[in-house]
Image (tube, helix red, strand yellow):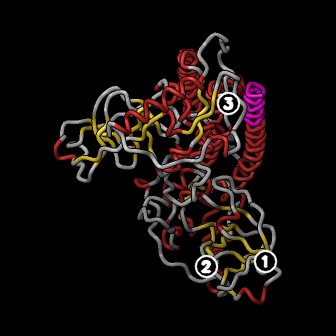
Amino acid sequence: MLQLAVRGQLVPQNEGEEPADSLLERLRAHRTQLIKSKAIKKPKKVPPVAAAPLPFQVPPTWSWARFVDVANIASNLVKPAKYPSAPHIAPNNIEKATGRLLPYQTVAEDGVRSAKHRFRAGQILYSKIRPNLSKVITVDFEGLCSADMYPIDPWIDRRYLHAYMLSMAFLEQATDDDNRLAMPKVNQEQLSAVMVAVPPLLEQKRIVAKVDELMGLLDRLEAARDSRESTRLALRNAALAALQYADSAEEVEVAWQRIAERMDDLFTDPADVEPLRQTVLQLAVRGRLVRQAEGDEPASVLLEQLAADKAQLVAAKKIKRPKRVPAVSDDAVPFALPQSWAWARFVAVANIASNLVKPGEHSSKPHIAPNNIEKGTGRLLPYQTVGDDGVTSSKHWFTAGQILYSKIRPNLSKVVTIDFDGLCSADMYPIDAWIDRDYLQAYMLSGAFLEQVTGDDNRLAMPKVNQEQLSRVMVAVPPLAEQRRIVIKLGELVGLLDRLAERLEDTKNLHRAFAAAAVHHLEA
């Protein structure tokens, strides 16, 4: 809309109106008088408009001018101690690209010490740092602003100039010479040289009125959309809560059917699928995804057999004897389990393997690092060989059938099952599963597991789960036959969720493409 406005395509031109050329002649005379009276400083010379290619064609009644021809970049640095109760405006008090003023405080409340610009009512404030953020506002009060801002006296319609400074026509010029550093700035010379498309004065006012009308419409549309989205999220969360806290597999089926009937209304964005995926995993590891079968051998019998098998492996020196971990206490378990299930420490259902090797001997083997595993899904992403990755330090040797778990940043839930041999980062644990491998992976992706491995997280930039912490994690263990039924059901539901996410992503991309095409058509 702003692009249409500053290109002369938003409102019709009136032939009888004074052309912009005449307006600019008066402004030049006005500027000369202000300089002579020393009301403003004489600006540095900028190249004439004719010396540069024009950004785009404008209507015949319009003219191009340099920014310095239509406004004065003011500078009035003062000591803030003299103005403790004055409003203080900094770049972070201006909303990006909208021209809206955000909440602000006084000079005293902000604890301002260094010199600031004093601004007047009627000026435009423009942030010269990070120009790509388009932080520009009009002010109707006096105060102090950051030295990283320019107070500007507009000589054409203030609100038209404000709209122009928010448009891409202005932004593309203000960032053209940007050096792309962390804190780019627009200096006064660059701002002075920006070319401004200037309409006749009466047309400027019509443009501003039309922009206000359309902005009001867009604000109402946005408010209506936000209201609908808030209602949708509330309904989605209520449906997920009903599913997550269902007390039996039968109640899960009912809650799932309700979601399935309103899937298109409740889930409209690919990001909506993740909480549903996590809910399904939580149901699976709590014994509510599939029904229990009376004939299944209880998990306690399975765990006894695993303990005996582990003892034999330790005796045969096939695995190292793990450090002792506390026994599972009934008063410390994360949640209640079905009668045929049992709680066990991680070390009782899996072996945390370690076999560091030199990479030079395995250059053609696959190399898996944490960034080769998708967050929270258990999917393996594209990877390269040890040689292609230029690996030099020692890595873990893993074998087909193991689970790889990233011990760094455990909140990212990077865990994957592997069906080939290779080398993995020393920041990962190769794990031998002694219960159903796919069930254990699902448990390691669930919130039940995540809450435990992040419970002792020291919140540093690179938190890690050490082997002792992982060994102590409590695992909800179903009967072996039920583990397999859970894995089959999860496969069905995760496949459904993957297709849902893909469909929502396609729809989102289609909406983007349609919006871009519509805007292009309007600007053409």
Name the quadrant containing residue 517. top right
How many other residues sit within 10 Å of disc 1, few (<14), some (14-19) or many (≥20)?
A: few
Q: What mark, if any, has residue 388 been given in the picture?
A: 1
Determine if the magenta segment contains residue 305: no
How many other residues sit within 10 Å of disc 3, few (<14), some (14-19) or many (≥20)?
A: many
Query: Please, what secondary structure does the residue beneath circle 3 have?
Result: loop
Quadrant containing the N terminus in the rendered view: top right
Relative to residue 510, is residue 374 drawn left or right? left
Q: Earlier in the sequence, mark 3 or mark 1?
A: 3
Residue beneath disc 2: 311
How many other residues sit within 10 Å of disc 2, few (<14), some (14-19) or many (≥20)?
A: some
Residue 374 coordinates in the image, percent (x, y):
68, 57
Residue 85 coordinates in the image, percent (x, y):
19, 36
The amino acid type found where label 2 is placed reads Ala
Determine if the magenta segment contains residue 519: yes
Q: Earlier in the sequence, mark 1 or mark 2?
A: 2
Residue beneath disc 3: 268
Q: Residue at x 60, y 83 (%)?
A: 320
Q: Is residue 249 above or below residue 131?
A: above
Query: Please, what secondary structure does the residue beneath circle 2 have?
Result: helix
Residue 246 visible from this viewpoint: no
The amino acid type found where label 1 is placed reads Asp
Extreme residue in the right direction: 364
Residue 400 coordinates in the image, percent (x, y):
78, 71
Q: Which residues are magenta?
A: 508-524
